[in-house]
Image (cartoon, rainbow, N blue to C red):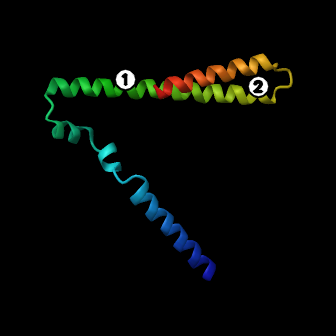
Amino acid sequence: MNQKAFLLIILMTILFIYNTHVYPFEKEISGNFFEMETRLKLSKEQSEKLLKIREKYFSDMQRLRYEIFKKNIELKNLYFDAAADESTILNKQKELMDLRQKLEE
């Protein structure tokens, strides 16, 4: 009984910390796009441009994350492949680093 209560208290503490300290401005960051439009007092044209930029950004990021995911799998397969030589692995690592760098730009 004491162990269950202790685990429950720890879990509740972690959830409380996570919800209040790690992302204190989550509502501001992930809030409704149209609320941001109102707060910034954007014209309809500006809002449309901003929405297009945002959609393009998310599309590009999704594509890059997928490419990184694929390269990670390919690299892991190379690690387990006894026939893979060092240069092949190094090339795949470089490709992966280049994609990660693009993601951070």
Label 2 close to label 1 by CB (< 8 Å) = no
Q: Which residue is mark 2?
A: 78
Where is residue 48 shown, x and y percent of the image? 22, 25
For disc 2, the neighbor class at 10 Å (few under 14, some 14 to 19, many from 20) is some
User: Which residue is located at x 60 percent, y 77 percent?
Assistant: 4
**The disc labelled 1 sits on which kind of residue?**
Lys
When asked about the image quadrant of residue 88, the answer is: top right
Q: Is residue 1 visible?
A: no
When asked about the image quadrant of residue 70, the answer is: top right
Q: Look at the picture and state if 72 lies above or below 23.
A: above
User: Which residue is located at x 16 percent, y 23 percent?
Assistant: 45
Q: Look at the picture and state if 14 lies above or below 6.
A: above
Q: Look at the picture and state if 8 lies above or below 23.
A: below
For marks 2 and 1, the one nearer the N-term is 1
Specify whether 34 is left or right of 9: left
When asked about the image quadrant of residue 24, the answer is: bottom left
**The disc labelled 2 sits on which kind of residue?**
Leu
User: Which residue is located at x 60 percent, y 24 percent?
Assistant: 97
Where is residue 42 shown, x and y percent of the image? 15, 31
Secondary-structure class at tag 1: helix
Q: Is residue 64 visible?
A: yes
Cα distance in 3D space between marks 2 and 1: 33 Å
Where is residue 10 shown, x and y percent of the image? 54, 70
How many marks overall?
A: 2
Where is residue 38 shown, x and y percent of the image? 16, 39
Q: Which residue is mark 1?
A: 56
